Image: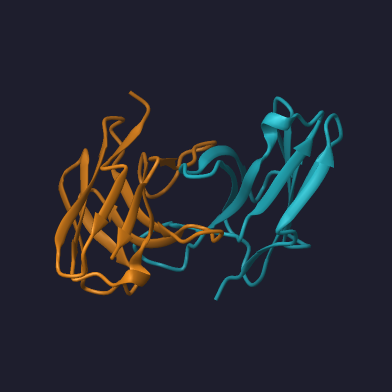
Chain colours: A cyan, B orange
């Protein structure tokens, strides 16, 4: 079955630096991959979606890359701010079911941006 | 309205109680989901509803019973739960199970359930 790994449980960086989070998966390549932000006690908030035929996607200070050869996605936050501190989750669709797509999440990376 | 609303926000129930969690969205989304999240773990899929029909049940115990009365509402009926069922229960929706470009799921804030 598909496994999704986010390499770091926690990542501490200094304000203003670029945070880079990693998501690796095994087995088949998904049709798309998503990144979410989750704050404590809240539901995940959708950030970006990247499709298998896209190499890179940007939104403001966020950038996502998708390498289907390496089976890896990188998520970058440039010019990081303390307000970016949260848990970031990558999520893949599981297309093996006839019922349609459904999202499965990686373990998450807790990002702490220090002033 | 671009939100998924979950009620109640907090729920404490005994192991013999029957309670229900409610989820509502008015975005016209035709796919709705229940996820369970334990502390410091990612959300885990429980159920998928597509066009008001149950399409995926991830081997969830029968003490959890989902219901989709109409395209805007999703309920999760709880009965005879165990303390280990204590978790954050999240509802989510999407336009349809096959996502359109650049569209993710919209999650509610969840119901924090404690079983005593």
Camera sees residue A22: no
Tell me where residue A75 appears, x and y as whole percent: 73, 44
> Which quadrant is the N terminus of chain A positioned in?
bottom right
> Which quadrant is the C terminus of chain A positioned in?
top right
Tell me where residue A38 appears, x and y as whole percent: 55, 43
B106 left or right of B115 in image: right
Q: Residue at x 63, y 47 (%)?
A: A88
Q: Residue at x 27, y 51 (%)?
A: B11
Q: Nearer the viewer, residue A71 or B91?
A: B91
Camera sees residue B11: yes
Q: Residue at x 73, y 31 (%)?
A: A82
Q: Nearer the viewer, residue A62 or B83?
A: B83
Q: Nearer the viewer, residue A17 or B13?
A: B13
Q: Is residue A44 above or below residue A60?
A: below
Q: Is residue A70 above or below residue B91?
A: below
Q: Residue furthest front?
A: B116
Tell me where residue B105 appears, x and y as whole percent: 44, 42
A20 left or right of A47 in image: right
Q: Nearer the viewer, residue B22 or B58?
A: B22
A99 left or right of A50 in image: left
The image quadrant of residue B7 is top left
The image quadrant of residue B23 is top left
Tell me where residue A50 appears, x and y as whole percent: 63, 44
Numbered label tally: 0
The image quadrant of residue B109 is top left
Q: Residue at x 27, y 74 (%)?
A: B61
């Amino acid at each position: 079955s598909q496994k999704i790994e986010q390499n770091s449980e926690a990542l501490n960086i200094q304000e203003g630096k670029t945070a880079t989070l990693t998501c690796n998966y095994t087995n088949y390549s998904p049709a798309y991959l998503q990144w979410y932000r989750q704050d404590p006690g809240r539901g995940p908030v959708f950030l970006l979606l990247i499709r298998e035929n896209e190499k890179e996607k940007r939104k403001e200070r966020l950038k996502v890359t998708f390498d289907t050869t390496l089976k890896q996605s990188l998520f970058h936050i440039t010019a990081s701010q303390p307000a970016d501190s949260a848990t970031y989750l990558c999520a893949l669709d599981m297309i093996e079911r006839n019922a349609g797509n459904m999202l499965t999440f990686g373990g998450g990376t807790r990002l702490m941006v220090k002033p | 309205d671009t939100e998924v609303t979950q009620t109640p926000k907090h729920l404490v129930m005994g192991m013999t109680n029957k309670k229900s969690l409610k989820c509502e969205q008015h975005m016209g989304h035709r796919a709705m989901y229940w996820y369970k999240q334990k502390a410091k773990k990612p959300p885990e899929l429980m159920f998928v509803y597509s066009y008001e029909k149950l399409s995926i049940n991830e081997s969830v115990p029968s003490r959890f019973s989902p219901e989709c009365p109409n395209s805007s509402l999703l309920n999760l009926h709880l009965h005879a739960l165990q303390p280990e069922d204590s978790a954050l229960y999240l509802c989510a929706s999407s336009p349809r199970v096959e996502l359109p470009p650049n569209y993710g799921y919209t999650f509610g804030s969840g119901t924090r359930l404690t079983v005593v």
